[in-house]
Image (spheres, helix red, strand yellow):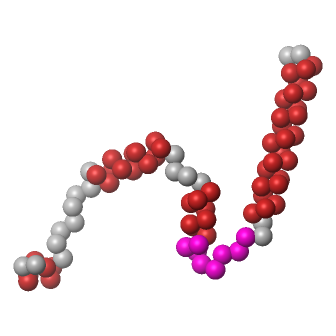
């Protein structure tokens, strides 16, 4: 590896570290009134990978349909 490549890699690492520090510093002050708000915020920051969403969709499609509630079966609704 040449000295130029080594220097470029070192600069990239330093940039990544500074970006991580800046990103974490911005998130430090967040407070949430409820757990739901925290989960919504986290969900917006971390999108579900397409492969996982597809797999989840297939799994849910294979789930059996729930039975009618007992009161609907008795009343015939």
- Identified at 26% across, 51% down, the residue is 62
Q: Quadrant of the C terminus?
A: bottom left
Give percent across and percent down for residue 55.
Answer: 39, 45
Q: Is residue 30 left or right of residue 64?
A: right
Which residue is found at the position 83% from the left and 37% from the top?
A: 13
Residue 60, relative to residue 76: is it above or below?
Answer: above
Q: Within the magenta stretch, is there residue 36?
A: yes
Q: Is residue 3 above or below residue 20?
A: above
Quadrant where the image shows the N terminus:
top right
Vertical placement of 10 versus 63: above or below? above
The residue at the point 64 percent across, 80 percent down is 33
Q: How many marks?
A: 0
Whether residue 46 is situated above or below residue 67 in the rendered picture: above
Assess whether residue 4 is covered by the magenta stretch: no
At horizontal 56% and vertical 60% (from top left) the residue drawn is 43
Q: Which percent across, then down, holds residue 9?
A: 84, 29
Q: Is residue 51 left or right of residue 9?
A: left
Residues rendered magenta in the picture: 30-37
Q: Quadrant of residue 25?
A: bottom right
Tell me residue 72's x, y (percent): 13, 79
Query: Which of the 4 image quadrants contains residue 3?
Result: top right
Secondary structure of the magenta portion, mostly? Answer: loop
């Amino acid at each position: 590896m040449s000295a130029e490549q080594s220097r470029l890699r070192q600069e990239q690492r330093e940039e990544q570290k500074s970006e991580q520090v800046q990103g974490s510093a911005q998130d430090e002050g967040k407070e949430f009134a409820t757990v739901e708000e925290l989960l919504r915020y986290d969900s917006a920051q971390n999108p579900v990978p397409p492969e996982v969403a597809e797999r989840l969709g297939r799994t849910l499609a294979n789930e059996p349909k729930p039975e009618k509630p007992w009161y609907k079966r008795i009343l015939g609704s």
